[in-house]
Amino acid sequence: MKIQIDRNGKTIPTDDSWQFGIGNDHACQMLRADVCEHVKLAHDELGIRYIRFHGIFDDDLLVIQRLTDYFNFAAMPWAGKVQELSFRQIANVFDNVLKCGMKPFVELSFMPSAITKGKKVGLRYRNHIDMPKHMARWCDLVEKFIRFLLERYGKEEVESWYFEVWNEPDLPIFFHGKQQDYFELYAATARTIKKADAALRVGGPSTSACRWVGEFKSYCEKNDVPFDFLTTHHYPGDGFGNSFGVKDAFKMMKITHDNAKNGVDLGDTLTEYFFKPDIYKTWTKGILRKLDETARREAGDTPLFTTEWNSMAVYSAPVHDEKYSAAFLVKSVMDLKGIMDAYMFWCCSDVFEELFILGKPFHGSYGIVNNDGIPKPNFWGFKLLSQLYPERLDLPVTNDAVEYSVFVDGEKTQILLYAQDFDYAKHDTTELEITINTSARSVTKQVIDDNHCNPKAEWLKLGKPDLLTPAQVKMIKESTRLVSEPQAFTAENGNTTIRLSVQTNDVVLLTLE
């Protein structure tokens, strides 16, 4: 494959919307020292500024405690009316966020059991997903929460945060109600926030698959409901709907029976349940950009944030630990070209509790940092993006087997190569000959492939231990860091030619000086 580059072409600003923020499971995790270390690493190494998580009002943060919460008092008359409101644990969470160098992107969820209308829960940590029994109780909680934040952290600081109402209200696992219910919940919440401080920024609808963006905006405009920004989520597969059906249920029952009989562990069983590479290879390359473009048209000039995205919405998928994820995130960010105002990857740490907290060092969780604090290939993909020069050649998005983007800063040039593919089994090799009209004195490369930035491979060499020793963690970190290596080239007649090979889902950053 021959690539001819004219570095004197039209340029556009390099898109850094991914550095705006990142997600991280649910609020309670920010009370863990190891998770805080992972979050601080993302800030310090990658320059990520905001962090978002679910469940700031979940019962595990003890916002509203009642006498009936202790089972020995449950039958006592009037015990349910004896309660205490406390933001102490929330203070610990936000204190830790700020100590990590981040700012909170506050997702207002879920419903405290003391004020919920029903008993529906969604995830392992038993988040309540019903509407409030009385909207006034919810609004009272929100107002007291906002006033607590203003008093503790100061008006100037809190006004630099963002407030998003709920998470994915279009999905029954997160919200037990209809679209109109959510719109009413949002309206009451947004008005309450603005009542406390009109300068605070609030938005929604935080939906999956870029749904409801236009409808939500229209509702707010017609009903004079404040909104400062719009939020939504997407993953590959969103554009094709859910594929789970009766056949899948029977297949899962068979997997459960066989794995119980054969002693297969929980993590490997989840992988068999949910990881379906034969489906993924049918996905359309560049699908996230198509979803982004639709959402942008519906949003108009309103700031638009993607507050969740990843290579797939599948827990315990091997791709999250491998170069597949790095190539996907590089491709996705390169496709943006200014469409989004914020592009927040989901998520930071592999310590993740929506289904289970799995203990193995590499188990296919969504994070960019594993349980032991080891950066994964997707972490290093973001590290490459953080090094890009401020101007980029305005080249078309091609969706070719191997794509490239070019960045310039004065006489310096970078060429970013990415061979993203949804086919997990594909291992094609492409020989590249790159010619660019500049005479380089030196060329270096940084690589994410099977032999570089691949901590999972080092773990496999150790025999896949369930727990790594501190010495093993240190060894893997040191041996899988992103490194700069010399790249062979020729320079003559004002041109530089570089020849190299890349395999499917490799990522390479060439720097010419």
Image (cartoon, rainbow, N blue to C red):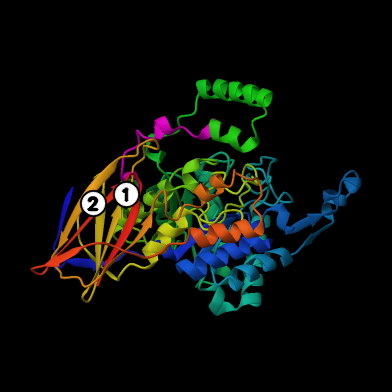
Location of residue 50 with respect to 242 vertically, above or below: below
Give the residue at x 60% y 68%.
97
Q: Identify the secondary structure beneath mark 1.
A: helix
The crowding category of the residue bearing disc 1, from other C-alpha atoms within 10 Å (few below 14, some 14 to 19, many at least 20), is many
Mark 1 highlights which residue? 289
Does the magenta run of residues contain 280? yes
Mark 2 highlights which residue? 397
First of labels 1, 2 by sequence position: 1
Q: Which quarter of the figure is the C terminus placed in?
A: bottom left
Tell me the tag on residue 478: none
Give the residue at x 20% y 70%.
440
Asked if one can make out residue 450 in the rendered structure from this viewpoint, the answer is yes
Location of residue 494 with respect to 75 vertically, above or below: below
Does the magenta run of residues contain 109? no
The answer to the question of whether label 1 and label 2 lie on touching residues, with beta carbons closer than 8 A, is yes
Q: Nearer the viewer, residue 358 or 475?
A: 475
Q: Identify the secondary structure beneath mark 2.
A: loop
Q: Nearer the viewer, residue 360 or 390?
A: 360
Q: Nearer the viewer, residue 475 or 10?
A: 475
Give the mark toward the camera: 1 or 2. 2
Q: Where are the magenta residues, as a range? A: 273-289
